[in-house]
Amino acid sequence: MNTNEIRTRYLKFFEAKGHRRLPSDSLVPENDPTLLFTGAGMNQFKAQFMGEITDYTRATTSQKCLRTGDLENVGKTSSHHSFFEMLGNFSFGDYFKEEAIRWAWELLVGDFRIDPALLWISVYEQDEEAYRIWKEQIKVPQDRILKLGPKENFWPADAPDKGPNGPCGPCSEIFFDRGEAKGEERLVEIWNLVFTQFDRKDGGALDPLPNKNIDTGMGLERMAAVMQGVDTNFEIDLFAPIRQRILKLAGGAGLRELGPKVRDLNAIADHVRAAAFCISDGVIPGNEGRGYVIRKLIRKAAWHARMLGVEGLFQSEVAAAVV
Ligand code: SER
């Protein structure tokens, strides 16, 4: 299944379950001083989570996201990106854990036909309710349900101790098992189901929100790698024209000849794609704030390009492949 089909199938699945399909928000969040860039599907729904907007209670989106906390790893690992798309379904005071879990399983195992024996689950160590739903209703074997702490299974991570203030809650993650031979990269997280039920206040107080909510996030590029049976996100259909363009600029080198330099290729593909999407949302490279982040992405892409022997100006040509 190609990436566009996965995106469409996801959105249609949740539309059929009464969700309003909404467009991605901009990468530049409006009226949210806590964020430099949109980094999750839920960002545009904070007012709904707080119970302040009530004209619909279910939504589904494919959200453009930018996360730059871990740039050094991009290109080196199989599934990190700065820019990526996150598929999500959201409930604002409507359905809660049971439906969110049941529908996630139905989509993965029913529609996407993933072998259930290759799926692992994690739940927050204090969330007995989610644990029981996975074990007793979905019948996931106990040895494939991991109980983890607030760093792994709270959204935002470690929110009770470290913040930020605002909507948060325990989460349950779904992992795809790529086999023991993959070592540390054996389990790849494909979907995060967040049970958004608290409003964190100064000092770490977790006040219950007026309603219980659902916020899920599935990494589109990771899901595509699973569905297309490839080892890294950079091998999915969506990256093929971008990588081909870079290889052409690098003198027509083939993927095999690159050896470990495939990491440079992947980093360029990621960074130029990220910069192109940011610029199209109105962020211009500059010396501070958002502009500085874009400038850094462009500079890093240029550095990786030199590793491949690409000299001079080249990023607009790669951006054309992104477009
Ligand atoms: N907000 C959660 C995440 O970004 C789920 O969408 O992982």
Image (cartoon, rainbow, N blue to C red):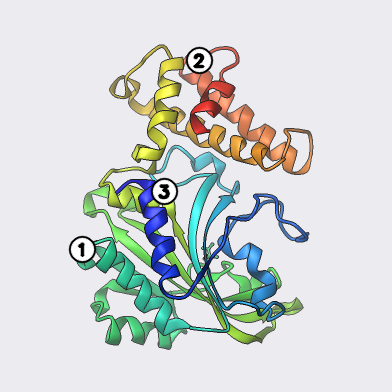
Label 2 beta carbon within 8 A of ligand 1: no
Callout 2: SS: loop
Q: Where is residue 272 in the image (x, y as percent from the top left)?
A: 56, 32
Point out the tag, 1 or 3, that comes first from the N-terminus. 1
Point out the tag, 2 or 3, that comes first from the N-terminus. 3
Residue indicated by mark 1: 115
Point out the tag, 2 or 1, that comes first from the N-terminus. 1
In the image, 268 versus 30, the foreground residue is 30
In the image, 274 versus 238, the foreground residue is 238
Q: Position of residue 135 (x, y in %)?
A: 29, 83
Residue indicated by mark 3: 221
Residue occupying the point 42% across, 75% down:
17
Real-space CA distance between mark 2 and mark 3, rounded to the nearest whole angstrom: 26 Å
Contact? badges 2 and 1 (CB < 8 Å): no
Residue indicated by mark 2: 310
In the image, 179 versus 212, the foreground residue is 212
Examine the image and state in which quarter residue 12 appears. Answer: bottom left
